Structure formats: C-alpha cells, structure tokens
Image: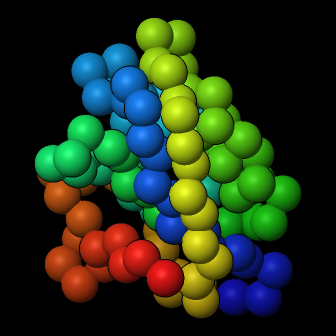
Amino acid sequence: MSGRLRRRARVRGRVQGVCFRAATREEALRRGVDGWVCNQPDGSVEAVFEGPAQAVEQLLAFCRRGPAGARVTEVAAAEEPPQGLRGFTIEPEPPRGDAFRKA
C-alpha cells in the first residue's frame, strides 16, 4: 500500500444538519479516496480518509471549509497507518474499534 496516506479528522462547528457527510462522501469519491464519515454525539463530524497523499490533503482542505451552510471552527487531523480501506461510506457511528482517539 505504498503511496497511500491515512488521516483521521474531527471537524467541529456547525457541521451537522448541513449535508456535511454527503458532501464529504461526494468529494472523496470524486478524488478516489477511501474511508468513512459519521456524526458524533457532541455535534462534530469524524472522518477517515485513505488514499493518495495529495487527494487526502485536498479532502482535509474541503473539511476546513465544508459545504454551503456549514461553519467550520476547527479541524483536528492525525496521521495513522493505512489499513487498506476500499470505498467510502457514511456510517451511523465509527466502525467498531475505529473511534477517534485524542493524542
């Protein structure tokens, strides 16, 4: 899986109820990035992006501005080892054992 980068992001602000997850999925599919996105109980959105470094960085840039109607106040991102994800899904919660861990 050389050449692949994995980043986990937590996006805060007005990011729920504004189609943030759907827009993130569209951006990921357009750029060929694998992973998932989900809402968190605290009102934030969590996402994992895995793919070519430039495409992953472009998705993080998208998260910093969000779709129309969003107001992003913070994006925390951490690099993780790639896990070979395939496809991009909107999840009701983080996949089991894959929850955001603060450093």
17 or 34, nearer to the observer: 17
Q: Residue at x 36, y 45 (%)?
A: 45
Q: Residue at x 18, y 78 (%)?
A: 96
Indicate left or right for 42 with 67 as reference: left
Q: Quick one: 2 or 92, which is closer to the camera?
A: 92
Quadrant of the rendered structure where residue 5 is?
Answer: bottom right
- Does residue 9 show up? yes
Relative to 80, is 77 above or below?
above
What is the x, y in percent for residue 29?
57, 43
Q: How is the image coloured?
A: rainbow
Instruction: Please tell me in which quadrant of the rendered image residue 30 appears.
Output: top right
Identified at 59% across, 89% down, the residue is 81
Q: Is residue 16 left or right of residue 59?
A: left
Q: Position of residue 99 (x, y in %)?
A: 29, 74
Q: For residue 64, what is the image quadrant? A: top right
In the depicted structure, whether residue 53 falls above or below residue 82: above
Residue in the picture at 78% in, 88% down: 2
Give residue 58's position: percent from left, percent from top.
76, 45
Location of residue 71 in the rendering, given as x and y in whole percent from the top left corner: 50, 21
- On the question of residue 34 being in view, the answer is no
Report whether 91 appears left or right of 33: left
So how many labels did they put on this image? Answer: 0
The quadrant of the image that shows the N terminus is bottom right
Give whichever of 59, 103 is nearer the camera. Answer: 103
